[in-house]
Image (cartoon, grey):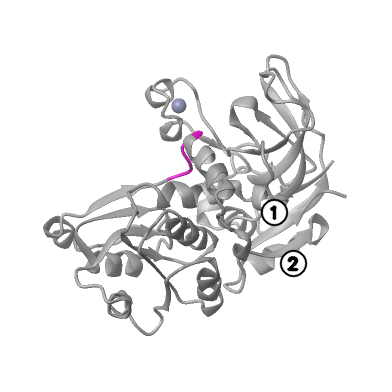
């Protein structure tokens, strides 16, 4: 089968023929229809410091996908059947650590990442344990189903703290920040302000429902407060950029008792004014992945309730054109880019 492979420990990706994976007991073989390109995949293509320590070549990339069940291994529950439309949770958990045993699988200490530490979904077929498969029971557009993994990051982050009637600040208008803005509005926030330095992405965020999309290349978050008429700061912050200046400016603009959910992964350690966090009595929570499978349930019912993610999807390519697709995904003039694997 065709697959996009990190074949050598150097920058680049290789479209190659590799053996089709076989489902073992408890596994599901999925014929991949569409996949989404994630920042993780861009890191692996460019072979940066993170990728060099996280990935061993050769490795099939990809963890955002939708596909059709092609075969099931022995012991797979009957509610997953050949022909079902499915996506997959890309964090494979150990099942044996304290958190896994307690049912808190998203907190597993020994998570293995699909397309990072195990062969992924940028291929014609992928194998996943049945416990990681999410069956789409209702109507979902294929492009939206392909990005359930990052949509889950957005939902998990946005719904970490109560939002109804609150003023929400999102720093970083990448695809996940934009989806989080849509979720926050849908979930009943009063104001959703989002910041970035890309006018293109800020416009996408407006289309997705942000109350205010502010270019912070020449100003700060205090300007967002002023424009929205806030008196005491934002109630909930969603940090999506991993940028030190974004978190610092967010902390400066939170209300006393404000709550911050941090999904953006900083490239290195940095200083923040902890005295401000103490005296403003701010809660900060780190977010990684999705809750299995409460977040997946929430994603499905949010879409059923009318949440529209289509503004975030801005490009679609056949898998043979992966280089052009990756180039577009790497610019700040794109939202989510889809690769099509169906003939
Ligand atoms: Zn575990």
Residue that label 1 marks: 143
The N terminus lies in quadrant: top right
**Residue 147: horizontal and vertical position, in percent?**
62, 51
Q: Evaluate whether residue 262 shows in this view.
A: yes
- Indicate yes or no whether the magenta region holds residue 15: no
Residue 60: in sight, yes or no?
no
Question: Outermost residue toward the right?
Answer: 343
Report if residue 289 lies within the magenta region: yes
In the image, farthest residue toward the left: 279
Question: Of discs 2 and 1, which sits in the foreground?
Answer: 1
Is 212 on the left-hand or right-hand side of 332?
Answer: left
Residue 291 x %, y %: 46, 37
- Residue 7 locus on image (x, y percent): 72, 48
Q: Quadrant of residue 165?
A: bottom left
The stretch in magenta equals 288-293
Report how many numbered discs are placed on residues in the image.
2
Look at the picture and state if 332 lies above or below 343. Answer: below
Identify residue for label 2: 324
Q: Front-most of 295 and 73?
A: 295
Residue 251, numbered circle: none
Q: Secondary structure at mark 2?
A: helix
Disc 2 from disc 1: Cα separation: 18 Å
Q: Residues within 10 Å of mark 1 (few under 14, many from 20)?
A: many
Is residue 87 left or right of 226 when viewed as pictured? right
| Mark 2 neighbour density, 10 Å: few (under 14) some (14–19) many (20 or more) | few
Q: Looking at the image, is 291 positioned above or below residue 161? A: above
Mark 2 or mark 1: whose residue is earlier in sequence: 1
Of the four image quadrants, the one with ligand 1 is top left
Who's the residue at 32% across and 49% down the image? 162
Q: Please report the residue visible at 72 percent of the width from the left and 15 percent of the height from the top.
A: 74
Q: Position of residue 116 (x, y in %)?
A: 59, 43
């Amino acid at each position: 089968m065709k697959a996009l492979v990190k074949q050598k420990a150097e920058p680049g990706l290789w479209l190659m023929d590799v053996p089709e994976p076989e489902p073992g007991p408890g596994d599901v073989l999925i014929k991949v229809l569409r996949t989404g390109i994630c920042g993780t995949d861009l890191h692996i293509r460019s072979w940066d410091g993170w990728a060099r320590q996280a990935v061993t070549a050769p490795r099939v990339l990809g963890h955002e996908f939708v596909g059709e069940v092609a075969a099931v291994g022995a012991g797979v529950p009957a509610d997953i059947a050949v022909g079902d439309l499915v996506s997959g949770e890309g964090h494979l958990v150990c099942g044996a650590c304290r958190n896994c045993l307690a049912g808190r699988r998203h907190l597993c200490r020994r998570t293995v990442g699909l397309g990072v530490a195990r062969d992924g979904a940028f291929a014609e077929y992928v194998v996943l344990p049945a416990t990681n498969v999410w069956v789409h029971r209702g109507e979902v557009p294929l492009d939206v189903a392909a990005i359930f993994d990052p949509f889950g990051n957005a939902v998990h982050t946005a719904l970490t703290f109560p939002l109804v009637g609150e003023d929400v600040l999102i720093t970083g208008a990448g695809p996940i920040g934009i989806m989080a803005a849509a979720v926050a509005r849908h979930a009943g926030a009063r104001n959703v302000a989002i910041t970035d330095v890309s006018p293109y992405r800020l416009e996408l965020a407006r289309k997705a429902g942000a109350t205010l999309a502010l270019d912070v290349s020449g100003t700060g978050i205090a300007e967002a407060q002023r424009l929205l008429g806030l008196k005491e700061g934002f109630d909930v912050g969603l940090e999506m950029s991993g940028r030190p200046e974004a978190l610092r400016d967010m902390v400066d603009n939170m209300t006393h008792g404000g709550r911050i959910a941090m999904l953006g992964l900083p490239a290195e350690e940095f200083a923040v004014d902890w005295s401000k966090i103490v005296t403003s009595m701010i809660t900060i929570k780190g977010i990684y992945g999705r809750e299995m499978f409460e977040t997946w349930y929430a994603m499905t019912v949010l879409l059923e309730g009318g949440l529209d993610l289509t503004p975030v999807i801005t490009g679609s390519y056949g898998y043979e054109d992966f280089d052009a697709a990756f180039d577009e995904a790497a610019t700040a003039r794109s939202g989510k880019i889809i690769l099509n694997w169906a003939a």
